[in-house]
Image: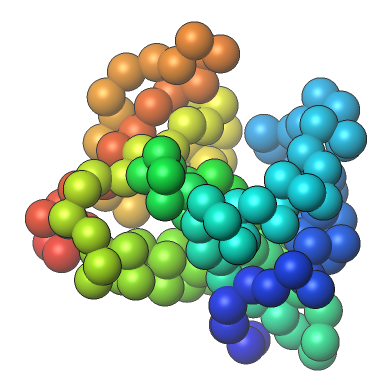
């Protein structure tokens, strides 16, 4: 497994992973456009990828404007191999080396993602209008994870 910063050249593979997932499925695969990925990678945030044999198998992107995890997805063929955990480690360690403000994310209830975030130390702080659970991670909580 190789981890590196995501680039605009990865966008097609990022979207392939995003639409392949079994949870937090997009109702319309065209809801997120190549321009959205480019904006989050170059203007609003930063991202990382995991690749195996020159194929991307997972990615994570932070929205620095909203202090939000915009994406953390692993292709179903590579779940339960530690890809998501390592992407989260890289992403949150980088973020909290730069910033003190907490991060937040939303995920659907009763999913493996919900369980993953709880086990990783994210704290539930409420519900979003769309029904997702809103989680937050503080710098102190991450340092003590």
| Residue 97 to residue 117: above or below | below
The reply, left or right, for residue 34 in relation to residue 73 is right
x then y, percent, for residue 66: 41, 39
Residue at point 34%, 71% (across, down): 94
The reply, left or right, for residue 81 in relation to residue 19 is left
Residue at point 56%, 56% (across, down): 43
x then y, percent, for residue 117: 40, 45
Q: Quadrant of the N terminus?
A: bottom right
Q: Quadrant of residue 36?
A: top right
Can residue 57 be seen in this snapshot? no
x then y, percent, for residue 14: 77, 60
Residue at point 62%, 87% (across, down): 2
x then y, percent, for residue 27: 81, 24
Q: Quadrant of the C terminus?
A: bottom left
Residue at point 74%, 68% (across, down): 8
- Rendering colour mode: rainbow
Q: Along the line of sight, which residue is nearer the eye, 13 or 7?
A: 7
């Amino acid at each position: 497994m190789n981890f590196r910063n995501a680039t605009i050249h990865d966008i097609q593979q990022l979207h392939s992973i995003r639409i392949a997932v079994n949870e937090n499925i997009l109702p319309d695969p065209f809801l997120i456009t190549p321009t959205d990925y480019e904006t989050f990678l170059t203007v609003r945030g930063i991202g990382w990828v995991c690749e195996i044999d020159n194929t991307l198998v997972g990615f994570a992107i932070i929205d620095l404007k909203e202090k939000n995890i915009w994406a953390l997805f692993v292709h179903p063929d590579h779940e339960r191999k530690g890809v998501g955990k390592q992407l989260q480690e890289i992403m949150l360690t980088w973020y909290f080396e730069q910033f003190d403000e907490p991060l937040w994310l939303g995920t659907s209830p009763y999913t493996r993602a919900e369980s993953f975030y709880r086990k990783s130390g994210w704290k539930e702080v409420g519900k979003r209008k769309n029904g997702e659970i809103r989680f937050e991670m503080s710098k102190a909580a991450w340092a003590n994870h």
